[in-house]
Amino acid sequence: MAENLSDAQLMRAIRAETNSPENKLLENMQILEKKPTGLCAVHLHLSQLQRTNRKPDYIRIAERCFDPITITHMSDLFVLANFDIVLSCQSSRVEEIDRALSSIRNMFRADPLIERRDISGEEAFCTWYDLEEDFEYFKEAVVSSILSAKRQSLDKNVASMDDEKLTPKNLDKLAHTFRKLDARPLMRHQSAVQVGTNGQGQLLFREYYVSIADLRKIVAPDVDLLADRWLFQYLTTILDQRVLHMLRSQTMDDLPKNISLNLNIQTIHTKDFQLFDHFVGENAHRFIIEFQPVDVFSDIFAYEQVRDMLQTRGYKVLIDSLQPLVLDYFDPSKLKADFYKIAWGDRLGASATQEGRGEMRELIQSIGAANVIISLVDSEDAVKFGLQLGVQRFQGFFVDRLVEAMTQKTAAAMRGA
């Protein structure tokens, strides 16, 4: 276990990871120590955020807040494995650093970390250092953070039973297995409903997807498929092909009246989708194609081209898994999709502050409530909140129970007739 390793052993392990941010930060500190005059540093303790806010996408946005400094001035920025951010810069850039910190505080304003203070009244969110005077304190704090992150990482690896990581070396073997995969046993579906003003629910569509947990059990029980997002995305493009093939093996009458599919953008350019489109024919209006935000923003021009083509054919386009926190930093309506899924959670849900809920109200209204689907709905509160904003479309485990009740009621009525 990691707690049995000494600090010196952990430090040697960190030094061996030559390209890691932690090792690069240690190297940078050696340079700063020789000439700290006129330099300052800021340590953002984002590892202390609530778990729901410690997400790579959020941390990436926080990192980008420093772009005006890191791009135009002599500075160094490091994002550690535990999500702490360390910036070293010329002391003359204090105002610009303050502006970036203000943006990040605002971004995480609902998190208790932002208001927390130590016994001397200093904020827990970040620590400033004048490197000419405080270098030893800075070094001690950073090394402590790096060692803590390494211990957590090692403990996590032990807990995951040392699963093999998804790498280019094992990718070809898995890709070969995926291409022969029968997707039918792995297919799952989840309903989305539209709730009217009278409280009655109507089935909007059924989302078809492959259970990744079940997929791993069958094809790669000892491989962490999510270890590398880009390699995993490559595998999901093959998975898309198998799903499209499975759907083409049925008749349109076998499929739900309206169905959504979560696909990769590049899948739309493949022969498999062309065959699927031919199979769909004039029924394209029955299909909603869902894209992940990370796929959309990795190549916005490719998305726009695919979106226009799909909408021209009659398909509807949906942007999946929009997190409320991320929505503060771009206007989703510019994506010109037909629907947007916003996740129900701490920011949107009952634990959000009144101010946060008010801002989300404005956001949903700016997108257009008719275009919003609240996803991950786990309670009646989510439905009530959405209805108050004019949102009528919902998806999640609570909705599944509603659909089951609707189905049983319809079946009982038919038996009675």
Image (cartoon, rainbow, N blue to C red):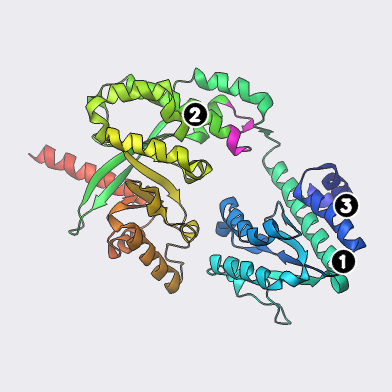
Amino acid at dot 2: Thr
User: SS of the residue at dot 3?
Assistant: loop
Res. 27 mark: none
How many C-alpha atoms fall within 10 Å of the one at disc 3: few (<14), some, or many (≥20)?
A: few
Residues drawn in magenta: 220-231
Q: Please state which of residues 409 and 131 is positioned toward the viewer in this rendering.
A: 131
Q: CA distance from mark 3 to mark 1?
A: 29 Å
Give the image location of residue 62, x and y in percent: 61, 59
Amino acid at dot 3: Ser
Q: Decide: is 213 above or below 9.
A: above
| Viewer can see residue 398 | yes
Please check the rendered image and state whether residue 110 is part of the magenta-colored stretch, yes or no: no
Give the image location of residue 68, x and y in percent: 64, 61
Residue linked to disc 3: 6
Q: Residue at x 30, y 64 (%)?
A: 389
Res. 36 mark: 1
Amino acid at dot 1: Pro
Mark whose residue sits in front, 2 or 1: 1
| Viewer can see residue 264 | no
Residue linked to disc 2: 237
Give the image location of residue 332, x and y in percent: 41, 53
Q: CA distance from mark 2 to mark 1?
A: 49 Å
How many C-alpha atoms fall within 10 Å of the one at disc 1: few (<14), some, or many (≥20)?
A: some
Residue 257: name its quadrant.
Answer: top left
Q: Decide: is 281 above or below 11.
A: above
